[in-house]
Image: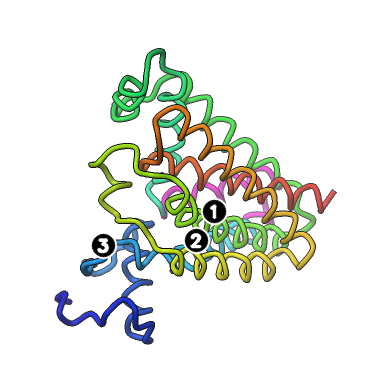
Amino acid sequence: MSDSAIPDSSLRSPLRWLVDLHLAAAFLTRLPLPPAHCDTGGLAPAMAAFPLVGGAIGAIGGLVYVLAALALPPLAAALLALLVGVMLTGALHEDGLADLADGLGARGGRERRLEVMRDSRTGAFGVLALLFSVTLRAAALAAAPSGWAALGAMVAAGAVARAALPAVMQALPPARPDGLGAAAGVPDASVAARAAVFGVVLAVAGLGPLPALAAMVAAAAAAFGIGWLARRAIGGYTGDVLGAVAQAVEIAVLLVAAAGWK
């Protein structure tokens, strides 16, 4: 589809939403989708659809949990569900978490940390961050009283994690002028608001009203914490910071769900 065929981003027509959803899915997943082309706003306008894609990723992982739990212990089912999510996304957010952890653990100033984050090699801090991320999420899912409860939690976590990204990009400046974070463009407040609405709706659908409220509070705290660390250490956000935010928020939502199940 050519740029001229895409309606103005201010017009939220059904066609525009389909274009946004396609672009969001092409960016966030490794699904074999037709090539997606950004309009003059870059990826930023399509970020309103991020929670929908995140919820779909969570739903697929949740269905794997439901089926696996018929024959396997809860922890094994949880690990398989997370593995499917990693395969769908190409470990996009896990890679960001590992890179940010290595950058924060590096000795030196801002430029040194950014240099370490650009390095494709994963250091000790990155490995530990991934270990804790997978372990916490799997342990939380294994506490689910049923496969369907785990599915709902995965939908909520996937949606809220992606809904947090436009808000973080609104709150922080880019840490550098190049890179994925800067190239995506900055979503305006309306994009962040629509993403937040989708995140809340899917959280309520997956967890119920009161657990969803607690999950949103925990998610906001997790996003704020990663954002504060990034602002202090490197001056703003990068693609890696956004990946780390998504991981931290997903962990927070699943832990809140597990606390409710207990």
Q: Check disc 2 and report the residue beneath it.
A: 54
Type of amino acid under label 1 = Ala
Q: Residue at x 62, y 50 (%)?
A: 220
Q: Residue at x 53, y 36 (%)?
A: 228
Residue 75 forms part of the magenta stretch:
yes
Quadrant where the N terminus sits is bottom left
The reply to whether callout 2 and callout 1 are in contact (CB within 8 Å) is yes
Q: Check disc 1 and report the residue beneath it.
A: 161
- Disc 2 is placed on an element classified as helix
- Residue 22, by quadrant, is bottom left
Residue segment shown in magenta: 67-88
Residues 97 and 149: in front is: 97
* 3 or 2: mark nearer the eye: 3
- Secondary structure mainly formed by the magenta segment: helix
Q: CA distance from mark 2 to mark 1?
A: 7 Å
Q: Residue at x 42, y 50 (%)?
A: 87
- Disc 1 is placed on an element classified as helix
Crowding near pointer 3: few (<14 within 10 Å), some, many (20+)? Answer: some
Label 2 vs 1, first from the N-terminus: 2
Type of amino acid under label 3 = Gly
Q: Give the numbered dot on residue 151.
A: none
Q: Where residue 223 sits in the image (x, y, percent)?
A: 56, 45
- Disc 3 is placed on an element classified as loop
Q: Where residue 15 sits in the image (x, y, percent)?
A: 32, 85
Q: Is residue 73 visible?
A: no
Q: Where residue 40 sits in the image (x, y, percent)?
A: 21, 67
Q: Check disc 3 and report the residue beneath it.
A: 42
- Residue 139, by quadrant, is top right
- Residue 107, by quadrant, is top left
Q: Is residue 152 left or right of residue 58?
A: right
